[in-house]
Amino acid sequence: MTIQRMAVCDDDPTMVAAICQILKRHPATARARVITANSGEELLEEPGLEALEVVLLDMEMKTLNGIETGRRLKALNPELLLIFITGHCDYALQAYEIEGFQYLLKPVTNERLGLVMDQVVRRLEERGAFRAGQQRIVLQTKEQLVQVPYEEVLFIEKKLRKLTVHTLTEPYECYGTLKKFQENLDSHWFIQCHQGFLVNRFRIRRLTSEGLHVEGHGAIVPVSRRHRPAVKAALEEQLFE
């Protein structure tokens, strides 16, 4: 998977630039949007901090130090992964107390930061797998109420007033509109590829002129001209995850 949103904060602009160069060379962070700042105050004024996944944060800054900056960032986003950067280990206990994810000693090397980014990716993947296990589609069929985990859903097909949810094991039919059905789904998992189809993006294997080839199903799911750019963008993103 790839990391989408990060920040690097250090009162040494040279250090910020060096870290950003390393991040650009790592497969998981090469395409990330990286906010840079030279003080805790400057970072905290940036918009969209709630959406950050990872922050690399200098411990020893002149006014607002890394610990206090990290504490305020955690208040905005408790799941944020904080990586503290410092010249010595004196702050390790404080970093632990605010749930710092990792601790990097200066000078930050390409090898060491790369290993930490690998650890970040594993942690984010673990979170994603856990959430996927918690997320389910609830269907009221004619015979029963069914809960289907997201990862088992291949695609959803609309025919007149009826919806068919194709899964790894069997199809389930229910009544409703595709639009209403889509409103209750996680848009990170399901994308619309046609007026009458939603597809699980993690089940797409390839896109051809015929349509989408989906893992676990022999049918080819159609892709309309209108939705093709969004589907293609999702597939390109998937290459880096």
Image (cartoon, rainbow, N blue to C red):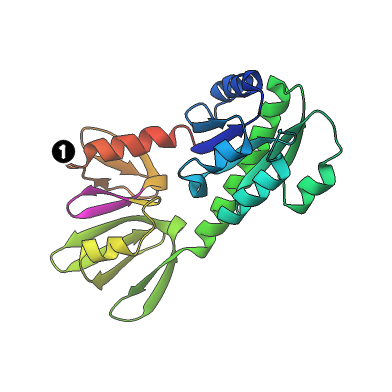
- Residue furthest to the left in view is 160
**Magenta span main SS:** strand
Whole-percent x, y for residue 99 in the image: 72, 51
Indicate the quadrant where residue 122 lies: top right
Q: Start and end of the magenta stretch?
A: 191-200
Residue at (66, 36) in percent of width and height: 57
Whole-percent x, y for residue 23 in the image: 58, 25
Determine whether, in the image, residue 99 is placed left or right of residue 190.
right
Determine whether, in the image, residue 144 is placed left or right of residue 72.
left
**Residue 215 visible at all:** no
Residue 194 shown in magenta: yes
Q: How crowded is mark 1: few (under 14 residues within 10 Å), some or many (20 or more)?
A: few
Residue at (74, 36) in percent of width and height: 59
Residue at (59, 20) in percent of width and height: 17
Q: Which of 58 and 198 is in front in this view?
A: 58
Q: Which of 118 and 133 is in front in this view?
A: 118
Whole-percent x, y for residue 210 in the image: 21, 37
Q: In this view, does 25 lie above or below 132?
A: above
Amino acid carrying label 1: it is: Arg
Determine whether, in the image, residue 147 is placed left or right of residue 86.
left
Q: Mark 1 points at which residue?
A: 225
- Residue furthest to the front in view is 63
Determine whether, in the image, residue 189 is placed left or right of residue 44.
left
Residue at (62, 38) in percent of width and height: 40
